[in-house]
Image (tube, helix red, strand yellow):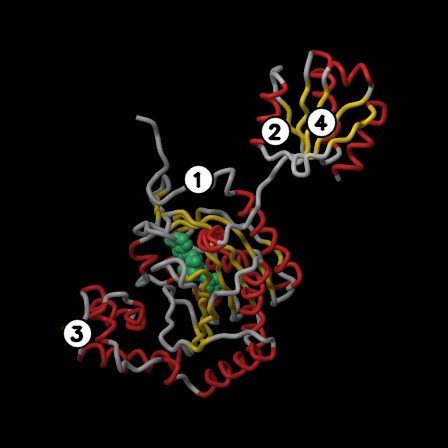
Amino acid sequence: MSIATIKGFKDILPHETPLWQWIEKNARDVFRVFGFKEIRTPLLEWTELFTRGIGEETDIVSKEMYTIPDSKGRNQTLRPEATASVVRAYIEHRLYQLNPVQKLFSIGPMFRHERPQKGRFRQFHQINAELFGDPGPRSDAELITMAIRIFERVGLTDVTLNINSLGCSSCRGEFKNRLKGFLSDRAGELCGECQRRSELNPLRVFDCKIDSCKEAMTGAPVMLDNICDECKNHFEAVKRHLDELGITYIVNKLLVRGLDYYSRTTFEIQTDRLGAQSAVAGGGRYDGLISQLDGPPHSGMGFAIGFERLAALLEEEKKPLSDVPDLFIIALGDEAFRKGFIWADTLRKKDISVEMEYEAKGLKAQMKKADKLNAKRVLIAGEDELSKGKLVLRDMVTKAQEEIPITDLIQNLVKILK
Ligand code: HAM
């Protein structure tokens, strides 16, 4: 039996990669104008980084990590997200010494052993941004705006920005106890998972998709109504700054996130076009995470866009993107073939994409191939043309043909094709 990909892992095929490259280029352009610099961290980290960073009680850490022991039995994990790794790098390399405010982005694969379904994979990719060292609401607004600008730049405007505040360590502690009280009165109506969460991570019950749990949560106290004055002022200022920048949002008091490190502002960019997997991006502030991982007491904030989900939305819109050859050289006869092979290389050195056959074939077969590759133009070099000293250049869209003298062939082609 032939070997196939592992469940939840997928190939990104040549007809898909032009869209991926285009998305990445647009994201990089936005990062550049916002002053974000690229960081690339390893795919494998000590497991402890994620258990301490993301939280033992989260689904990611408790159920979804790909963990492998090293030869000494110490566990290593394929990164399920980028934030913890970027924070580790900020601390390990003392990036804050140069400037406490660091604006970093990374793009790459993540691994979570989730149940695969539409828009949910076990290896997926994120476009990730982190802003360290500024606790003020302006950085929240700027970071959220940057995420929205990426969506705008790729032409996706039918997404909804949801924002919420999850309070700080002091007001959330009190709130959790209140929520636990509410949940213990309704324990019988909750699913097994939510009964467990009620004790350990009660905010996560808001995220349960089961109808009976959703019903049981009607009338539950919400964090946003119970945040302290400082958190309230921060959230009001974030909204004001977003308004100033013309960013539209809805305040979603039920928005909680699947990672434990968040404090204050959290947000998700959602779509109704991907079924159950509605979040195309998510993020928020995490003011305690850097010190929790033994770094300086600097604040942090970030987001990640799900690459597959963004690509799926754009594919639905049928973005016409593909890499097509600028020129297909049709060579007929040994002499033309020998020359064509050299012309192709000369043009490629000048940044023009050229295709031709490897073996001699008839005119019809070569024309068919050029058509199949969607070549923009074909250059016909037959024995007749060679002896006349003029080749035929055909525009495959307009079907217009012109003669190009062999003497200045490369120069002429570069002029036309560039
Ligand atoms: P997250 O909400 O777990 O946040 O993931 C961010 C995005 O990654 C999701 O909105 C979704 O689009 C995509 N995603 C997550 N899991 C999968 C999956 N199994 N298959 C396909 N796409 C998926 C984080 O990861 C945080 N580290 C974001 C962040 C950065 N917060 C602060 N800084």
**Residue 96 visible within the image:** yes
Type of the residue with mark 1: Asp
Q: Which of marks 4 and 3 is in front?
A: 4
Question: Which element type, helix, strand or loop, lies under badge 1?
Answer: loop
Type of the residue with mark 4: Leu
Question: Which element type, helix, strand or loop, lies under badge 3?
Answer: helix
Residue 18 to residue 369: above or below: below
User: Residue 177: x, y in percent?
Assistant: 28, 80
Marked residue nearer the N-terminal end (3 or 2):
3
The answer as to whether callout 2 falls within 8 Å of ligand 1 is: no
Find the residue positioned furthest to the right: 407
Marked residue nearer the N-terminal end (4 or 3):
3
Marked residue nearer the N-terminal end (4 or 2):
2
Q: 10 Å neighbourhood of mark 4: few (<14), some, or many (≥20)?
A: many
What is the spatial separation of the Cα atoms under label 3 and label 2, in whole angstroms?
67 Å
Find the residue positioned furthest to the bottom: 229
Residue 382 to residue 93: above or below: above
Residue found at x 34% / y 39%? 6
What is the spatial separation of the Cα atoms under label 4 and label 3, in whole angstroms?
75 Å
The answer as to whether callout 4 falls within 8 Å of ligand 1 is: no
Q: Circle 1 sits on which residue?
A: 11
Question: Which element type, helix, strand or loop, lies under badge 4?
Answer: strand
Q: Circle 3 sits on which residue?
A: 187
Q: Circle 2 sits on which residue?
A: 370
Marked residue nearer the N-terminal end (4 or 1):
1
Marked residue nearer the N-terminal end (1 or 2):
1
Q: 10 Å neighbourhood of mark 2: few (<14), some, or many (≥20)?
A: many
